[in-house]
């Protein structure tokens, strides 16, 4: 759900415990048995919407034990928003079941996709520089308070059917004639706007960024949208895009957002 690349996971020494995606009776481990391209191909052809499933506690336990066996002194496990997934609960169950005197911190990012990814990378960098588990936990908590995630959708169908629509329920009455704008900065789905066209949706996202005094770790994420470059150009008018990160929304978030999602994530500078 952090939507980091495989290369980033390797480069920063990050262990990932993936969720699973179900298409009907077929279940796939995300990014192990199902690539992003294959997910969106299946999504376009599927009669019924896919579903996501949190990892079993045993999967976290295996990862924790592997890291401890490799010599880890402490483990900081940063999770997809607990308000949107049972993933964190599974991690907590696994941590309690590990025998011995172990230091495992299970943290709620209260974020998704590139917002979560920014926290994970920052934590890995801090760990590599010698930060303690206490320091990393405090840093992630602070970043969580300052991380913003906004997205615009082509449809609310996936969110509605997946049961993740949260406080955006009021948008359903007019969802056929609007492009819903959502604020996920709190880790929950909140209604943030009703736009009439795709162009106005992108302008709304641009204006969210423009309204901030100073931001860090700016990212664009989309469900393989063909107007990413258009939006990047729009962002360049209001923000420094030199270190802009652009990446696809993976299957976990893509299942609930559906096709045509584009969003921004950033951290408000302290």
Image: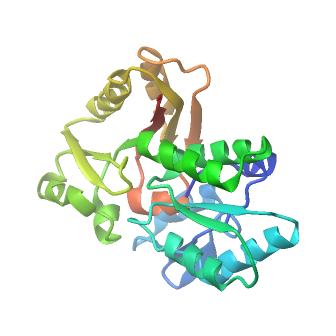
Q: Say which of 137 and 178 sits in front.
A: 137
**Quadrant (top left, top right, bottom left, bottom right) of the N terminus:** bottom right
| 255 on left or right of 4 | left
Where is residue 68 shown, x and y percent of the image? 81, 71
Point out residue 60 in the picture as x, y percentages from the top left corner.
66, 75
Residue 243: tell me if it is visible: yes
Name the foreground residue: 250 vs 244.
244
The image's colour scheme reads: rainbow
**Where does the image place residue 8, in percent across and percent down from the top left?**
73, 46
User: Residue lying farthest top?
Assistant: 237
Left or right of 123, for residue 177: left
Q: Which residue is located at x 47 percent, y 26 percent? A: 215
Measuring 57% from the left and 35% from the top, which residue is drawn there? 246
The spot of residue 115 in percent (x, y) is 50, 45
| Picture layout, residue 78 above or below residue 270 | below
Residue drawn at x 46%, y 29% as measured from the top left: 270
Position above or below: 153 against 94: above
Could one spot residue 44 in this view of the protein? no
Which residue is depicted at the point 33% across and 29% down? 208
Of 226 and 164, the residue lying toward us:
164
Task: Say how many tags the image has.
Answer: 0
Furthest residue in direction right, as rendered: 70
């Amino acid at each position: 759900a952090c939507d980091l690349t495989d290369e980033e996971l390797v480069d920063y020494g990050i262990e990932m415990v993936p969720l699973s995606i179900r298409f009907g009776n077929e279940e796939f481990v995300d990014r192990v048995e199902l690539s992003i391209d294959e997910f969106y191909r299946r999504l376009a052809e599927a009669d019924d919407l896919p579903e996501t499933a949190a990892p079993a506690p045993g999967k976290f336990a295996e990862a924790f034990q592997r890291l401890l066996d490799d010599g880890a002194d402490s483990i900081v496990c940063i999770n997809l928003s607990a308000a949107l997934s049972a993933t964190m609960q599974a991690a907590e169950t696994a941590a309690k079941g590990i025998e011995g005197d172990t230091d495992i911190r299970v943290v709620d990012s209260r974020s998704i996709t590139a917002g979560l990814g920014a926290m994970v990378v920052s934590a890995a960098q801090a760990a590599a520089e010698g930060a303690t588990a206490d320091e990393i936990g405090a840093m992630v908590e602070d970043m969580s308070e300052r991380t913003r995630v906004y997205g615009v959708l082509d449809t609310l169908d996936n969110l509605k059917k997946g049961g993740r629509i949260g406080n955006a329920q009021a948008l359903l009455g007019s969802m056929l004639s609007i492009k819903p704008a959502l604020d996920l900065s709190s880790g929950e789905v909140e209604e943030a706007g009703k736009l009439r066209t795709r162009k106005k949706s992108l302008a709304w996202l641009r204006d969210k960024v423009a309204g901030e005094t100073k931001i860090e770790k700016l990212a664009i994420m989309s469900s393989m949208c063909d107007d990413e470059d258009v939006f990047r150009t729009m962002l360049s008018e209001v923000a420094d895009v030199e270190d802009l990160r652009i990446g696809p929304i993976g299957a976990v978030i893509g299942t609930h957002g559906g096709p045509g999602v584009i969003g921004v994530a950033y951290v408000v500078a302290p």
